[in-house]
């Protein structure tokens, strides 16, 4: 098994890299790692850990301090730190930039840390540096319906005039059906809802590129009564604002 | 459209000894599935709740060529995505492996209805497609190529008009055919990208969980990141591998398609249905023509006219329920009275038999208390069934949702709450029209605050006793308004605390208007009546016997009034009997409880007499008046209302009256309400919360009003 530090991703298999990461963290915390600690941390049997350790030993990444106390070789430490850096960077990316929940961000990072090439990592670091000098971009992304997180108010203050997908763009081309009036028609461009609401809208046939007619509204303007694929549907303002449409010019 | 033929992977094994066939009915809401279920089973059906949720489970039996067959009516769903309790229940039923799944589709709405069929096919069930409301579709000029449909799908396809029982023999034959020898079913092709992704995930799925569902379906759920499926796989040794693969495929698909995977999957599923319909449907009905239904809606769902029309419809239903229902209620009351007298007649006149008292005052009065609501419930549900079956209910929800939503309720909560003005019991039963569990529980819990008909006699007694004539009408109005305001505020509070959570999506389909059929309306009405009598009735009967025991025992061995008569005091015979009854009540468990609880109610301004009367009022609110009559030893409280009113007005200051009225308005709903809440919510927890929560709030409100009021008087 060869570890490369060039532009290619590591040739070591994913589980082995995960073990290395675990051992590194355990050593940082306790000064050593034991088979049973590793097994517990990774939620596997001790026998499985032993097999992995044998392979790591063959690659000269770990050494046995004493019978069951395991440490990392210099090479092993280097490899572990490399993965951990990727893990932290990716977690930050998913959490801070893309606005995913911390738990999901960590999971994504775990899946991707093994395949991230040095070049990709370098670009990502540069992207973070760029965000540091231009934080309004991140803010605009977080507030734009396209990049919004669940529960966010859609108050894009920093949209670019060229951004046609932003529903608050003054151009008539894109908006949510909540701002449509009875008698108007439009084509769905995007559904920004998540979870149960998104699924419900999809199940009802509200898909990108389908036509929606707003037929009437309830007393006081809401709920909205729309027709889509032959069905009549009633939607509240909150739901309607999740359906972005473009109106024929 | 492409379909790939695969070998049938049926769950029916010919080797097992003949057992009863199990059929499940699946379909969108408003597709006529329940009509079909009723047409199939007739009276041989059973309605219960799925454990832990307020989703109805309807099961029944019917015969195919003389062979009994079990059938379960799945809740109406648009998909099987497991986001709502209904969808979870439907998926679980499919996983339990019914022999045949009849997918009922509205022939006029095939595009959306067949999405569910596609999902059922992917899930690996053995479906029969039932194209319902075929008459409407034919009238609209839609022609369907049934043999072609069968050929393309590889499953039997039949047309029915369930509301009139048409096409049922053909459907039964198709079910039989599907159960005996499943045709070479075809796989739903969702396009290369998606099929490839599903195959890759399915290959890594460990065997075991949800074996009633196909691997492909589990792979699809995993691809869509279904939390329940992910959690179940995590628990398996090799599950993590499939999860990782699903994550990888999801990322790949989202990058390639440039949109969220859920949207992509929905598009491909609709694409499959579109392709299928292109080859089997000619000509598609023109959906843009404005049919009669739309012209009706121009008036009925009008921005300004809609609400007044709804008001008139409500009035008509209440008139039906409470005016037409009055006569049969009177008959039942007379019948119960006659029965009581008859049973009393078995014992010699003036006898003091405990058994007689148990039978007459406990059992017969208890059964009477249950039966007395039956005419109301039948009539109300006749009205509700008409509204539901005609399609008006959805319009009513559309019109009232804006106001109700402000208080965390749903448009469909409006009607049950209005019904509560008549009686909480049918009101709570009417919350069944609410699909979402949280909405339904909230409505159910606050509903008793609507001042019901049984409380009217109490107001009739107390309001004139404490208010001068000019103030009586406004006072009554304020009582009702206070109930409504508190109900709405409490609903808001519940949705912010115990029943917190995101609002269920209000994406409500508005079905076209349809003429309700007598059969379906009657079945719905009788269904509810049966449920009320069998389930709520038993609890109510039990509690009335307990309350009877509490108010009639133990008996005192001697009476104070007797010693006073012995001492030479002149007392009229009627007064003597009344005084004895009063002493008996005082001596009974209820009377002692009243005395015992007096300190708890003293800060509200009540004495033990009021508390004892309230204990009795738990049986039925109007009993309060009778109990007050007894503790004041007024021989006949009905005739003696004037006298009782005068006594009350003399004994208590108006402030106590206000406090008492508030307490009776808010506090513990009657036992029938508690029993029905228990029955409908499926848990004692909610019924007890309603009981103690409302009583607690009543105590607090009355306490504040009384104590603050005392500062000013």
Image: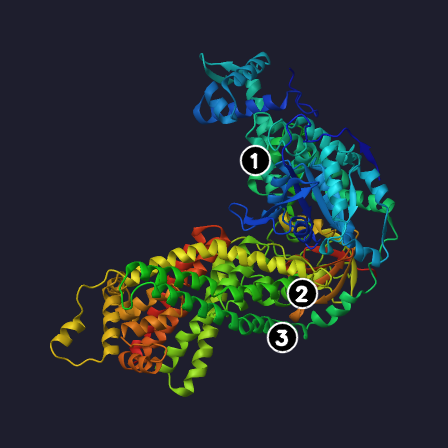
Quick check: A212 above or below B315?
A: above
Residue B681: horizontal and vertical position, in percent? 50, 53
Identify the residue shown where x is 17% and y is 71%. B560
Quadrant where the C terminus of chain A is found in the figure: bottom right
Residue B441: horizontal and vertical position, in percent? 51, 56
Furthest residue to the right?
B283
Quick check: B559 above or below B41?
A: below
Is disc 3 placed on a helix, strand or loop?
helix
Considering depth in this image, is B317 or A45 the residue closer to the camera? B317
Chain letter, disc 2 residue? B
As drawn, the label of residue B392 is 2
Is disc 1 placed on a helix, strand or loop?
helix
Q: Is residue A69 left or right of residue B403?
A: left
Q: Mark 3 points at which residue?
A: B312
As drawn, the label of residue B231 is 1
Q: Assess whether mark 1 and mark 3 are in contact (beta carbons under 8 angstroms).
A: no
Have a look at marks 3 and 2 and say if they share a chain: yes
Which is more foreground, mark 2 or mark 1?
A: 2
């Amino acid at each position: 098994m060869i570890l490369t530090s060039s532009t290619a991703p590591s040739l070591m298999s994913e589980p082995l890299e995960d073990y290395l990461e675990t051992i590194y963290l355990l050593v940082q915390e306790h000064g050593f790692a034991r088979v049973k600690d590793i097994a517990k941390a990774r939620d596997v049997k001790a026998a499985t850990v032993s097999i992995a350790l044998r392979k790591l030993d063959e690659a000269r990444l770990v050494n046995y301090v004493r019978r069951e106390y395991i440490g990392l070789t210099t090479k092993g430490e280097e490899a572990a730190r490399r993965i951990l850096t990727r893990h932290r960077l990716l977690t930050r990316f998913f959490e801070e930039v893309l606005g995913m929940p911390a738990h999901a961000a960590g999971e994504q990072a775990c899946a991707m840390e093994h395949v991230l090439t040095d070049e990709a990592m370098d670009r990502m670091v540069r992207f973070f540096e760029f965000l540091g000098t231009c934080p309004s971009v991140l803010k605009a992304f977080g507030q734009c319906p396209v990049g919004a997180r669940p529960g966010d108010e859609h108050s894009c203050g920093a949209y670019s005039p060229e951004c046609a997908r932003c529903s608050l763009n003054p151009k008539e081309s894109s908006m949510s059906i909540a701002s449509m009036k009875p008698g108007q028609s439009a084509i769905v461009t995007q559904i920004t809802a998540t979870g149960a609401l998104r699924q419900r809208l999809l199940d009802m046939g509200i898909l990108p590129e389908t036509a929606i007619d707003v037929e009437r509204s309830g007393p006081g303007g809401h709920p909205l009564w729309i027709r889509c694929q032959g069905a009549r549907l009633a939607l509240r303002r909150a739901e309607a604002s999740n359906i972005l449409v473009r109106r024929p010019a | 459209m492409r379909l790939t033929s695969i070998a049938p992977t049926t769950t029916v094994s010919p080797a097992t000894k003949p057992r009863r066939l199990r059929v499940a009915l699946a379909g969108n809401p408003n597709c006529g599935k329940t009509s079909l279920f009723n047409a199939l089973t007739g009276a041989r059906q059973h309605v219960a709740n799925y454990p832990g949720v307020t989703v109805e489970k309807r099961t029944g039996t019917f015969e195919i060529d003389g062979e009994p067959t079990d059938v379960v009516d799945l809740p109406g769903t648009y998909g099987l995505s497991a986001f709502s309790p209904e969808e979870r229940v439907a998926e679980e039923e499919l996983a339990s492996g019914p022999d045949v799944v009849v997918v009922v589709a509205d022939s006029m709405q095939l595009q959306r209805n067949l999405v569910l069929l596609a999902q059922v096919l992917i899930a690996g069930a053995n479906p029969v497609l039932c194209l319902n409301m075929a008459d409407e579709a034919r009238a609209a000029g839609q022609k369907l190529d049934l043999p072609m449909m069968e050929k393309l799908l590889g499953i039997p396809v039949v047309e029915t008009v369930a509301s009139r029982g048409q096409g049922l023999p053909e459907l039964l034959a198709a079910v039989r055919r599907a159960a005996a020898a499943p045709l070479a079913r075809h796989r739903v092709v969702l396009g290369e990208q998606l099929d490839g992704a599903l195959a890759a995930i399915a290959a890594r799925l460990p065997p075991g969980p949800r074996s009633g569902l196909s691997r492909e379906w589990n792979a699809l759920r995993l691809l869509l990141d279904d939390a329940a499926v992910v959690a179940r796989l995590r628990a398996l040794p090799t599950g993590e591998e499939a999860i990782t693969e699903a994550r990888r495929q999801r990322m790949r698909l989202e990058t390639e398609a440039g949109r969220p995977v859920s949207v992509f999957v929905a598009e491909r599923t609709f694409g499959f249905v579109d392709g299928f319909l292109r080859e089997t449907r000619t000509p598609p009905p023109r959906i843009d023509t404005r049919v009669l239904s739309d012209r009706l809606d121009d008036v009925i769902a009008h921005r300004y006219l809609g609400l007044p029309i709804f008001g008139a419809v409500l009035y008509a239903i209440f008139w039906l329920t409470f005016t037409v229902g009055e006569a049969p209620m009177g008959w039942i009351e007379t019948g119960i009275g006659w029965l009581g007298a008859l049973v009393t007649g078995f014992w010699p006149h003036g006898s003091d038999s405990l058994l007689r008292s148990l039978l007459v005052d406990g059992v017969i009065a208890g059964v009477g208390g249950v039966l007395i609501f039956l005419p109301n419930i039948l009539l109300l549900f006749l009205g509700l069934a008409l509204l539901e079956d005609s399609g008006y209910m959805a319009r009513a929800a559309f019109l009232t949702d804006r106001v109700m939503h402000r208080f965390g309720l749903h448009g469909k909560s409006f009607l049950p709450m209005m019904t509560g003005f008549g009686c909480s019991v049918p009101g709570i039963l009417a919350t069944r029209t609410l699909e979402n569990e949280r909405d339904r529980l909230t409505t159910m819990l606050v509903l008793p605050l609507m001042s019901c008909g049984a409380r009217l006699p109490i107001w009739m007694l107390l309001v004139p006793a404490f208010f001068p004539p000019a103030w009586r009408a406004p006072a009554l109005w304020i009582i009702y308004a206070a109930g409504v305001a508190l109900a709405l505020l409490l609903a808001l509070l519940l949705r912010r605390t115990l029943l917190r959570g995101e609002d269920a999506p209000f994406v409500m389909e508005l079905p076209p208007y349809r003429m309700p059929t007598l059969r379906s309306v009657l079945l719905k009405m009788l269904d509810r009546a049966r449920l009320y009598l069998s389930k709520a009735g038993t609890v109510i009967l039990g509690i009335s016997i307990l309350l009877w025991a509490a108010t009639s025992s133990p008996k005192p061995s001697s009476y104070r009034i007797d010693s006073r008569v012995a001492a030479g005091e002149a007392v009229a015979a009627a007064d003597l009997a009344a005084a004895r009854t009063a002493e008996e009540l005082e001596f009974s468990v209820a009377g002692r409880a009243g005395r015992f609880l007096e300190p708890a109610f003293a800060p509200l301004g009540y004495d033990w007499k009021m508390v004892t009367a309230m204990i009795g009022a738990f049986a039925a609110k109007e009993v309060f008046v009778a109990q007050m009559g007894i503790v004041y030893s007024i021989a006949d409280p009905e005739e003696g209302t004037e006298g009782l009113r005068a006594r009350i007005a003399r004994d208590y200051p108006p402030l106590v009256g206000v406090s008492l009225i508030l307490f009776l308005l808010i506090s513990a709903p009657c036992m029938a309400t508690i029993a029905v809440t228990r029955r409908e919510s499926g848990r004692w927890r909610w019924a007890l919360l309603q009981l103690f929560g409302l009583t607690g709030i009543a105590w607090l409100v009355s306490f504040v009003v009384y104590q603050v009021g005392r500062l000013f008087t």
